[in-house]
Amino acid sequence: MSNETLLARLRDSPGAGKLTAIRFAGQFGDGLFQAALSGAILFNPERESNPAAIAAGFAVLLVPYSVIGPFAGAMLDRWDRRAVVLWANVLRMILIAVTASLLFAGGGETPLLLLALTTVGLSRFVLAGVSASLPHVVRTSWLVPMNSLLATVGSGFAAAGAGAAVAIIGGIGAGDVGSGVAVAAAASGSVVGTYAAARFPRRSLGPATLAEPGDHGALRALADIAAGLKSGAVAVWHSPTVTAAMAGIGTHRIVFGADTLIMVLILRESTSTSLPGGLAGFGIAVGATAAGMLVAAVLTPFLLPRLGRVRTIIGALTLAAIVQATFIAALTQTSLLIGAFLLGVAGQTIKLTGDASMQIEIDDDHRGRVFALQDTVFNIFFVAALAVAAFVVGPGTVDLAGETSAHTVVYAGALVYVLGLVVVVVNARRHR
């Protein structure tokens, strides 16, 4: 199906258009918010710069969602998804305003990081809700190309948001004031998302079985989390492609987390020659990864019918292992950018394949908690890898000439990709 046909479908389907608006606006706001927080926390010369502090900064942005993720999944499969997406956007908008105010006031890092962590968690919540709702507004035969189109344009919106944050901070100046203005601008995504979600009729986005009025409170949802996650995990286990996708996503996030720490440490160096240091250099690296994700969004719809979903994941993991052992292991700025692009291709191919598998093979009553479980795996593995890499690298910075500890982290990442390949292959044989 051509992009022109998909765009025509968006025009003809108000529901698809509104979900698209929620996703694109949310990703633009996420790009703005996370880049602004990176400037305030990770690349602020007045703050701690050792590997452990950087890992902690990423952790506070990601770990809390791993805690609320199961609760989000329970709500997405029990409560009206339209209401969940609507109020998540409203709360996110409020938290962004509070975070910006705290930056303007020069508040401490602890409340700032807690606010940032909760805000990012709500953003993941919204994206999981949109993904789980998509089958209600498009036909099954359109899910793979629609996911590719949304990922292609959505990545562009996220990159545009990050670029806007870099431009705002560059124009106003590094520090809390510039970051505060950029954070405040991120509320625009939540405003658009709230408006679009409010235009959906109630209960139009699922789930198929809605909880009874006296049975859908937060306490009841909390009580059902354990059983809900268990049933979601069972649904994943019984789907060979979804199991393979989860293994592939977890493998990629482990390695990508360690690589991210190495990249941040390198870009904090003031002796950079081919890349600007700090947030601007990190933005270029993120842009390289986003470009790879765009390529994956174009390639995946062509690969899936020819290779099948499991073989596509195996091919992506193979590419990632080779890239990790060559381009990333070189530890030069040019090779790292090339590696970031190629890992973006591999990682997004796995993600798109997994999304299609979950939307097609997981029933509607379990789809929300499976998507939330995926995001939980995404975040826990990423942060755990950051923490381990920080311990291996130790205090100080990474020299572009290459440190033994940095190379140890990189080659260990290549081994993790190989182990992930083994898991996916063994899993495929078990199901056969």
Image (cartoon, helix red, strand yellow):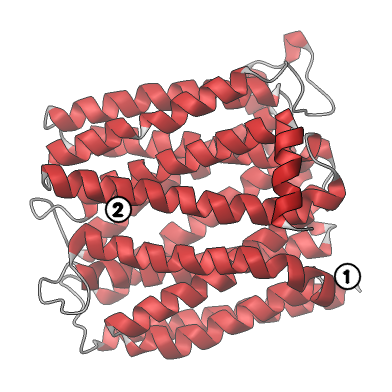
Position of 4 compared to 281: left or right? right
Image height of 92 relative to 166, above or below: above
The residue lying toward the viewer, choosing from 212 and 85, is: 85
Q: Is residue 160 visible?
A: yes
Which residue ends up furthest to the right in the rendered image?
A: 432
**In percent of the image, x 41 and y 38: which residue is there?**
29
**In percent of the image, x 21 and y 79: which residue is there?**
274
The residue lying toward the viewer, choosing from 179 and 301, is: 301
Q: Residues within 10 Å of mark 1 (few under 14, many from 20)?
A: few
The residue lying toward the viewer, choosing from 19 and 180, is: 19
How many angstroms separate mark 1 from mark 2 (CA)?
Answer: 39 Å
Percent position of residue 79, x then y: 70, 22
Image height of 224 relative to 172, above or below: above
Which residue is denoted by mark 2 in the rendering? 56
Which residue ends up furthest to the top in the rendered image?
A: 214
Quadrant for residue 83, please give it.
top right
Is tag 1's residue or tag 2's residue first in the polypeptide sequence? 2
Position of 24 compared to 235: left or right? left
Amino acid at dot 2: Ala
Image height of 247 relative to 228, above or below: below
Amino acid at dot 1: His
Secondary structure beneath dot 2 equals helix
Q: Residues within 10 Å of mark 2 (few under 14, many from 20)?
A: some
Image height of 405 relative to 427, above or below: below
Position of 118 compared to 224: left or right? left
Percent position of residue 205, x then y: 74, 28
**In percent of the image, x 84 and y 25: which residue is there?**
209
Q: Is residue 60 visible?
A: no
